[in-house]
Each structure stands twice: as C-alpha cells, then as structure tokens.
Image (cartoon, helix red, strand yellow):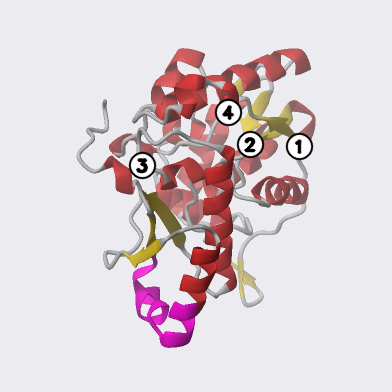
Amino acid sequence: MQYQADREGKTAEQPLPELTAAANRLLRVLSGYDSVLVAFSGGVDSTLLLAAALKALGRKRVLSVTQDAPFIKPGAVEQAGRLAQQLGADWLALPGRQMEDPDFLANPPRRCYHCKKILLADLKALAARRGLAGVVEGSNTGDAGAYRPGRQALVEAGVASPLAAAGLDKALVRRLARHWGLPNWQQPAESCLCTRIPYHTPLSRELLDRIAAAEELLHRLGFGLVRVRCEPGMARLELAPDELARAVQPAVRCAVLDGLHGLGFDRVVLDLAGYRSGSWDAGIQPGR
C-alpha cells in the first residue's frame, strides 16, 4: 500500500494493545470473505474499512465503489477516487438512481431507508457481475445509538458492517486510522445534502444545488464545519461553536449575507447552538 504508518517525528508510534486487538478483530472479520465490494464514501470509516480489506484480502479481491448523485457534495466523489488510488485500491463511481424514486423525493423521516435500499441493490448487482462474494459498508458501533433508518436496508440486503462486527466505535476508528497513517483520520463527519432539508419538504436538484453552493461559499470564507439548514424562506447556519463569533464580524457577516441572498435565501439566521448532527431528528427514537 502507498500510505505509511503514522509517525511522531522520526519514530513510528508503537502499537497499543487495544489498537492491535481492534485491528486483528477487523482483519479477522474481513478474512472470512473470499472477496468484497467496499461501499466507499471517502470518510474515515469507509477508508479504514477499505484499508483493512486490502490488508486482509489483497488488491485483486477488493473493489471500492463510490456513489455519484446530486445529493453528494461537489468534488466528494472525485476526492474519494483519489483517496482509493492512494490506498492502492481499484475504484469506480456508480451513478445513483434515487432521484428517480418518488418515495425518496418525498423526503419522509425514513428517507435514508429508501436511499440505502436503492444503493445497496445496485452495489449487490455490481458485485455479482464482478464475481465478488460480498458487499461491506462502514457503519461503526456508535451508529446504533442514532436515528439511522438505513440500517433496516442493510439487514434486508444482507450487507455487512465489519467495523461494527469487530466492536469499533468512532473513537477507535480514528485511533486505528491514525495509527495506520490514513490521511483523513481527523476528517469531520460528513452527510448527504438531503440532511439540510426538513422532512416532508420535497427534494429537487435545484434545492440541493443551492445548498451545495451556499456551503461552498461559507467554506471559501474560511469556515470549516458547516451546515446550511434550509427552512421555509430562510437558511439556518450551523457552524462549529468556536467559529460563531467570527460569523458576526461586520465584514464576514456582510459577505455571508450578500452571498446567500444572491443564492436566493431571503433570510439568513445563525444558530447559536452551533453544529449538531441530525438536527431534524430530535425526538425521533433510534429504533424507529
């Protein structure tokens, strides 16, 4: 592989027993497959999973696949492809069909289920055409405590989650990714653009493009963690708590307002609670 172990100065970090045990569990799970297709988003979870699959099975028995759809942030697919190449994996982009599905476009609270059902069916069909024994994806044990309706689709499709099966939570994923020298071990969690839109607001390419442009504007202004939650007639900005004060500095505030007004957002509000994963999911039970 083309990445190196994480180093501190010139001395490689010594493997801790917990990391060694976690790595061994993960490699043991993946070694149970003859070959796999890895659902690869380019985030730290799927990157660790792909790296482990390559270690356990070798390049010829692993294919990484990234979905390409309007609800994925611009540039993310290409970035995933470059990362897969850096890891030494075969990779391809798979066009998503969700925007053709009325159940998905209606944007119900179970939208993620409809999305995953389509994606996993396409991944399984591709794996069958390529003669690959299984499809795996990057959920970790921490995902069980959040509202994740897509998990039902995983169960129905028979798609495995080796990180969870090996007992890895997000913190352990990041530690192991750092130890293995994966370049995105500190990368913030990302989510699809649909998560910026209130449930039951119909999804459209125009709305998704507008949200993507708004978040790109904020990134260009120097903000790191950004969510533009689109509410009726306005954009509600969720930023990292340590970036809230900067957002109201006169020059920055004017640039944000001018840019978002130009994108068609009539009102712009700053959420003082800052970024929160799953803002629309408050009150929804994880198991529902």
Q: Which mark is residue 69?
A: 2
Q: How far apart are marks 2 and 4 (CA)?
A: 8 Å
Quickly name the residue at label 4. Answer: 99
Nearest the eye: 252 or 131? 252
Which one is closest to the eye, mark 1 or mark 2?
2
Q: How far apart are marks 1 and 4 (CA)?
A: 23 Å
Quickly name the residue at label 3. Answer: 198
Left or right, residue 10 beside residue 185: right
N-terminal of the pair, mark 1 or mark 4, is 1
Q: How far apart are marks 4 and 3 (CA)?
A: 17 Å
User: What's the amino acid at mark 3?
Assistant: Pro
Residue 248 magenta-drawn? yes
Q: Is the residue marked by circle 4 packed among few (<14), some (14-19), or many (20+) residues within 10 Å?
A: some
User: Over which residues does the magenta segment extend?
Assistant: 238-254
- Element marked by disc 2: loop
| Count of marks placed on residues | 4
- Element marked by disc 4: helix
User: What's the amino acid at mark 2?
Assistant: Ala
